[in-house]
Amino acid sequence: MKKRIQKDAQEIIEEYLKKEGISRRDALKIMGLGGAAAFMGGGTTQADAATEAKAASSAKGKIVIVGGGLSGVATAARLSKQLDNPDITIIEPNPRSVSYQPGLTLVGGYEWTPKDILYQTKDFIPKGVKWVQDKVVEFDPDNNKVKTQKGETISYDFMVIAGGLELDFGRIKGLEEVGTLYTLGQNEKAAQIFGDSGASSIYFVDGAELMKKNIKKFIEDAKAGKKVKGIFTHPNTPIKCGGAPKKIMFLTDSQLRNAGARENAELTFYPNGSKMFGVPEYNDAIFKLFEEKNLKYQFAHNLTEVDLNAKIAVFDHHWKEKGEWDPDLEEYTEVVKHERVEVPFDLLHITPPMKAPDLIGKSPVGSSKGFIPVTYETLQHKKYKNIFSLGDIAAVPLGKTGGSARKQYKVLVENLISVMEGKEPTAQYNGYTVCPLITEIGKVMLAEFVWADPANGKYNGIVAPSFPLDPTKPRWIYWVLKVYLLKPMTQFGMLKGLA
């Protein structure tokens, strides 16, 4: 069934691209696993080409990978192919994993179920790689050792840190009982705490299922003539999949329109920042979409408290004002002002504050901000040269998406092997990030960008489309790619070290 759907999707894609003036040859390039790989990260980079053409290295050394999610397993698979005698250990406690985390948006706002995105960890551990089903609780980088929760001490010659982020709901007053979660885990209690309040989050599996129920009730109420309010938040911390708060908002809007109930619903976005998107071209395009769809927004609002019983969200509205004159600096100081804002809701999507797990972030391999300090381009630890990091936990500007990880793990593998061979790392990650921004059921804006000018310390991002189409325009073709092709590319491409 799935093969038939994929075949149909490929035929649809080819027909569509022909209408756009793209040749059959070019159309074929972006179909199947190769096409989905392009969707995740564009064409072949110098690092990709060098890695593909290079014969297996005879470098020796014990490699420990902390974290067995997408980034960790993809790295292990790639190393297994590039080393002729690999010695690789993955330390990962979870027997299940989420191969395609962006699919959580489709669980919460569309027709997908958790079965569409979950898999058994053991099924994707590369052949010959040892899996320690445990959790690292102590890092000793000076002696090249880690200690696990079960008391085992594991030594290494080289280490890759690919742990995920924690969802810090407990930082929000009223959600202390929800506490700190991972995307996947024993999170049923958290969903129970949210209950029938109308509040939830697509950032964890049980929360995404609850969000689907909440949206359904929200639409039913609107369809029955009730005036309802939906609010969608974005916190004051770095987050993974930064477009997700807007994606679930757009999907809610789309479902309301399909149900003929949009006029009875007010939808408002409450981000802590002052922009829709960091890249100007995409920022402008999203503003236009908000205007077209009559979506409201309130910038500089950080969610600080939730009263689930009263259905009230509390925000810290903040802004700057000119303060007193500083005679030493010969300029006016800036004063940050704060205002408590209470907003009633019928539907609340919470994007929680996120952080690196304290056991990693506050360890000797972490940093003052919690994330792993790496050289942005090489992904090598700034202090410990035999340690590398990638994915959500790496302290790089931008880049907390699966598309970023796809670029990062290839660069990391090439650089790690170079260090194992006694050479300097030369492959460079260019900051590529992709956000397939769902704008309605059936359309996606493929927001791709790279670092602007890292040589001058500018990392705001510039548009870097993979396809010869206007990247700011939402298209049905990208919806087909996202829904039908991206997940198999991830599972059978990245997790195999191929895509």
Image (cartoon, rainbow, N blue to C red):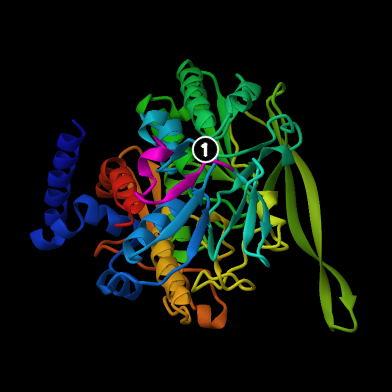
The extreme top residue here reads: 224
Residue 197: in sight, yes or no?
no
Q: Quadrant of residue 46?
A: bottom left
**Does 313 sit above or below residue 221?**
below
- Quadrant containing the C terminus in the rendered view: bottom left
**Does 150 sit above or below residue 1?**
below
Q: Quadrant of residue 463?
A: bottom left
The residue drawn where x is 62% and y is 67% is 373
Q: Nearer the viewer, residue 59 or 161?
A: 59
> What residue is shown with label 1?
94
Q: Residues within 10 Å of mark 1 (few under 14, many from 20)?
A: some
The extreme left residue here reads: 24
**Does 155 sit above or below residue 148?**
below
Q: Position of residue 458 (x, y in %)?
A: 55, 76
**Does 328 sit above or below residue 351?**
below
Residue 164: in sight, yes or no?
yes
- Quadrant containing the N terminus in the rendered view: top left
Q: Position of residue 36 (x, y in %)?
A: 27, 53
Q: Which residues are magenta?
A: 118-134
Q: Nearer the viewer, residue 21 or 353?
A: 353
Amino acid at the residue labelled 1: Asn
Q: Position of residue 448 (x, y in %)?
A: 39, 61
Q: Position of residue 208 (x, y in %)?
A: 50, 31
**Residue 123 is one of the magenta-drawn residues:** yes
**Residue 398 is one of the magenta-drawn residues:** no
Q: Is residue 37 left or right of residue 313?
A: left
The residue drawn where x is 63% and y is 46% is 152
Badge 1 marks a residue whose secondary structure is loop
Q: Is residue 157 left or right of residue 483?
A: right
Q: Is residue 205 left or right of residue 149?
A: left
Q: Nearer the viewer, residue 373 or 158?
A: 158
Q: Nearer the viewer, residue 347 or 396?
A: 396
